[in-house]
Every structure is written in C-alpha cells, then in structure tokens.
Amino acid sequence: MDFMEQAISLAKLAHGNVSPNPAVGAVLVKDGVVVGQGFTQSPGLRHAEIVALEQAGERARGSSLYVSLEPCCHYGRTPPCTDAIIAAGVNRVHIAMIDPNPLVSGKGRAELEEAGIRTFVGKYAEQSRQINEAYVKYITTGLSFVTVKIAMSLDGKIATANGDSRWISNTESRQFAHTLRHTHDAIMAGVNTVLADDPHLTTRFARGRGGTSRKQPLRVIVDGRGRAPHSARLFRESGKTILAFGRQATVEEKAAFGALDTEIIEFESNDGVINLKSLLKTLGERQVTSVLVEGGGILAGSLFDQGLVDRAYVFIAPIFIGGEGRSAVVGHGVDRLADAFRLEKISVTRFGDDTLVSGYVAGKSN
C-alpha cells in the first residue's frame, strides 16, 4: 500500500460520520516513514490534516503530506488547514482530488504553492471522488445524493399481493442494508410502506468510532395526502422524522406530530404526487447530503421518473412470487426500451444465496 492509498483507506474510516463535511484521510511521511496520520473527525472537530500534524509534532517539518482531498483554506467551524500545513514546515503536498467547494476549489493548492510548498494532484482521484460522491453532488448542486435500495424476487416483486414482504432478502443482505443506512444522512420511504410494514427505519450501527454514540439517520416519509398514523413505530424511535405532505397540514396535525419530534413540511403536489426535486432541495438546504430510499415501488418509480436517482442497490433473492405481487419500481416508466434507466459502473456481490447488483444511473455525473 502506497501513502496515498493509505490516505484513501483512512478517509473511508470517516465515511458516514462527518457529513456535511467530506471524508478525508491524511498521511505525513518523512524519510520514507509515516510520522503522522489521521482522518476527518465529527463536524466542528479536527480535520484529517490537523490530526496528522498534531501526531507528527516537530517531525512534520520537512515532511510530505498525502491527503485525499485538497486542504481547506477558509474559516468554517475550524481554521484553515492550509495555514497549519504551512506553519508546520511541510515541504510537499500530494492531493488526490481538488475540492469542488467554491470556497476551496484550487485556492487551497494555490496558497500552498505561494508558500513555497510543491503540490501534486490527481493520484487516486477517482477513489476519493467515490468516497465523497454525496458531498460532491451536494456542494455542486445543493441537492442530496439519492440511492435507491430494493430487495426483490427473481420476478421483480417486493411483496406478495397482500403485502407480505418479510423477508425477501436474507440475513446477510439485511445486515449490509444497515451498513448502508449508517453511511447515509437520511432514510426515505413512502407512506404506503409505513402503512404496510410499520418499519423502524433505523440503523443498528448507530455507534461512532471508539464506541461513541451517533444519532440515527433522519427519517423522511413522503406522504402526499397526509395519511401517516401517529401510532407508527418510526415516530417513537430516537432521532428526528420529517413528513413531506402534499397538502396543508392542520394545526392539530402539526401539534400532534411535533410532540413526536416530527416536522411536517408542505409541498405542492399533483393529485397527491409531491415534486420530489423540491423535497431534495429542501433537504439539501438542511445539509442532508445523502438519502437512502427504501420503499416502496411507487416512490422509487417517481424518483426514476423525475430523474433524481443517482445510484441503486438491488438485492435479488432466488425466489418467485408471481401473481399480483407488488412491483419493485412503478411510476410512469418509459415507453421505449431505448429510454430505460440503465445502470453503469456495475458491481455484483453475493450475500449467501442473494445476489446484489449495484451501479450508477447512466448519464448522472458520478
């Protein structure tokens, strides 16, 4: 493993714990020996470069820094990393990718160069971008990165005709699904899923590094006609829930759901179908960089129809349901196969006897 690859590995340790900041890893090397390393801490705490510099101490002078994302050069919750790098006497900085944030984009590198520090950019750029794909979309568009997760039978069903869906996927697949929940800021589901399955929409991995507690992801329920029952289990889980209404909520509804730490946000709708791009824009304004969509077929179909899906995880169980079972993706769909939503950068993984097919929606900038 070379030093930039090590920085990328460190960045992965921060993934799922630092949003809305990017996940960054940093390695300081002097005379071929690692003298400091670190990864981004929780928002408001130290960035990866600062962790590595503090670990290295005086050994940082004359060293080379390998960092997975361009060091910041502006005051946010913490001071600029470029100032600390310059003050520490680092000689060279290797950067995997330039930060797309307009406050940084190229400026951090320029500051280092002006201080006499040689910089090198581009090695492992694709790996860095993949770790921070949600951050990149959020910082460049203001919208949340959308991942659709589906568990279905070989004939494309997510439930039987009477709504039975437990369990299509196996234990290993469901365990991985909790990992996905952990690495996303929010979990989104349609109200039909709430009514049919009464899900918890939580992750079992709500623990931070070193066993520290981490809050549950935000829950977002798309409820065009305002049908979610107060008795649903998700309203009694820790963490916050947003109800996206397609109508005006009553004073009584706002008070009742408010007592359950649930906020109602009203959106324009067409016959109960919410403009989901407006919802994602609202979530982006609240620094929600990534959303995992877990149900159901109508919501997934609407997101595909509106061109809002970035990535898909499809767990396929070796079973046939048949009959009038519920389809994985509904919505309007396409009229021609040539217009079908196609995945690219595909990977196939086995979880026991389940098969996971994952990839990015073609034409999206990932």
Image (cartoon, rainbow, N blue to C red):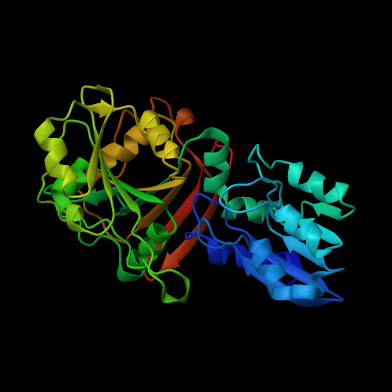
Left or right: where does residue 254 sit relative to residue 306? left
Depth order, front residue of 139/179: 139
Depth order, front residue of 170/241: 241
Q: Quadrant of residue 252?
A: top left
Q: Position of residue 240 (x, y in %)?
A: 28, 51
Residue drawn at the location 14% of the way across and 46% of the way down: 195
Query: Please, is residue 166 above or below residue 73 in the view?
Result: below
Q: Quadrant of residue 153?
A: bottom left
Residue drawn at the location 33% of the way across and 27% of the way down: 275
Q: Position of residue 77 (x, y in %)?
A: 56, 51
Query: Please, is residue 63 above or below residue 333 in the view?
Result: below
Left or right: where does residue 70 sit relative to residue 364? right
Residue drawn at the location 30% of the way across and 53% of the way down: 152
Q: Position of residue 233 (x, y in %)?
A: 16, 56
Q: Position of residue 184 (x, y in %)?
A: 42, 53
Left or right: where does residue 315 sit relative to residue 27? left
Residue drawn at the location 40% of the way across and 30% of the way down: 277
